[in-house]
Image (cartoon, rainbow, N blue to C red):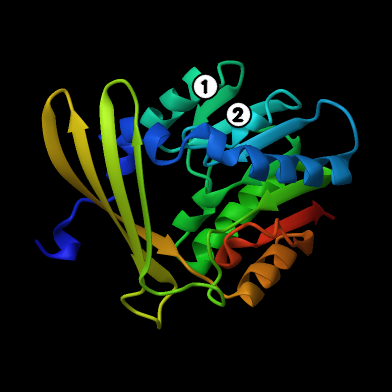
Amino acid sequence: MRYDDIARQRLYDDLARLWPLISPPEDYEEEAQFWRAALRAKLGPGRHQILELGVGGGHHLSHLVADFHATAVDLSEKMLALSKRLNPDVEYHVGDMRTVRLERTFDAVLIHDAIDYMLTVDDLRAAFATAAVHLRPGGVFLVAPDYVAETFEDDAICTQTAADDRTHLTYVEIDFDPDPTDTTIASLMISLVREDGDIKVELDRHVIGLFRRKTWLQELADAGFDVERWPTREEDDPRQRELFVCTMR
C-alpha cells in the first residue's frame, strides 16, 4: 500500500475509541499544571472563563476544569463524545477553530496540539483570529505546537503499549517530512489492536503543519497579541518546549 492511499485522520473518526489508550488523561497532568500556572500568572485567582479550541478527547482540559469554567470546541463529534464523558460539566460546540464564532468573549483561549492541523500560514492566521475575537481585552491565549521547524527531527518514532479490560494496543507513530520546502510534515500511525479475540493492524495518516518560530511570533503579533515564549519543564521532550503565552492588547 502506498502512503497516499492510507485513510487520513481515522483517529478522530472510526478509531477514536483508541485515543484513551494512545494518550491517556493522566499523561497530561504535569503539563496541565504548567498551563494552569501560566493562566494564574496572567489572570490571577478566581474561576475564570476559558475556551479550548480543538479539545479532542478532553484529556488536557480534564486537569483544568476544577479551577475554571470551561467551554470547548472540536470538529470531531466522536472526540467530543469522549470529552463529554470525561468532563460532563463543560459546554461543548462542534466547530472549526478557523471559523467558529460563539458570539461571546472569555478570559482565556487555549489551543493545545490541535494547532498542528493548521497546514498553511492562512490557516494559522485564521485560528489566531478566532482566539482574538473570543478574548476580552487583556485576555490570555495559550498555544503550543508539537514542533516548530527549528526543533523538528525527521523520522522520529514513538512507540507504546497499553491495555484496558477489552483492548490491548501496540502503537507506533512515525513523523517525517516528505517535502522540506512546504509547511507540512507527515505522521504515520500504526496500531496493532487485539480486541474481542480478534487482531487487526490499523493504519492512519495525518498531515501536520510545521512553521518557523519567527512565523509564529509574527502572526501572533499581527493578530493583536503581545507574545512571550515560556520555557517548559526540563523533563519535556526538547523538541516540544514551545509554549506561547499571549496577551490580548
Identify the amino acid type marked 2.
Ser
Residue 33 lies in what quarter of the image?
Answer: top right
Residue 86 is tagged as 1
Q: Residue at x 57, y 53 (%)?
A: 127
**Image height check: is 76 above or below 206?**
above
Looking at the figure, which quarter contains the N terminus?
Answer: bottom left
Measured from the top left, where is residue 96 in percent x and y? 48, 43
Residue 235 lies in what quarter of the image?
Answer: bottom right
Mark 1 residue crowding within 10 angstroms, few (<14) / some (14–19) / many (20+): some
Looking at the figure, which quarter contains the C terminus?
Answer: bottom right
Q: Residue at x 56, y 77 (%)?
A: 150
Mark 2 residue crowding within 10 angstroms, few (<14) / some (14–19) / many (20+): many
Residue 9 in view (yes/no): no
Measured from the top left, where is residue 179 in percent x and y? 34, 79
Residue 62 is tagged as 2
**Image height check: is 191 above or below 91?**
below
Q: Looking at this view, is 228 or 197 the one in front?
A: 197
Identify the amino acid type marked 1.
Leu
Left or right, 234 with reference to 167: right
Q: Earlier in the sequence, mark 1 or mark 2?
A: 2
Q: Helix, strand, or loop for circle 1?
A: helix
Residue 218 lies in what quarter of the image?
Answer: bottom right
Measured from the top left, where is residue 101 in percent x and y? 59, 38
Residue 113 in view (yes/no): yes
Q: Looking at this view, is 199 or 120 the one in front?
A: 199
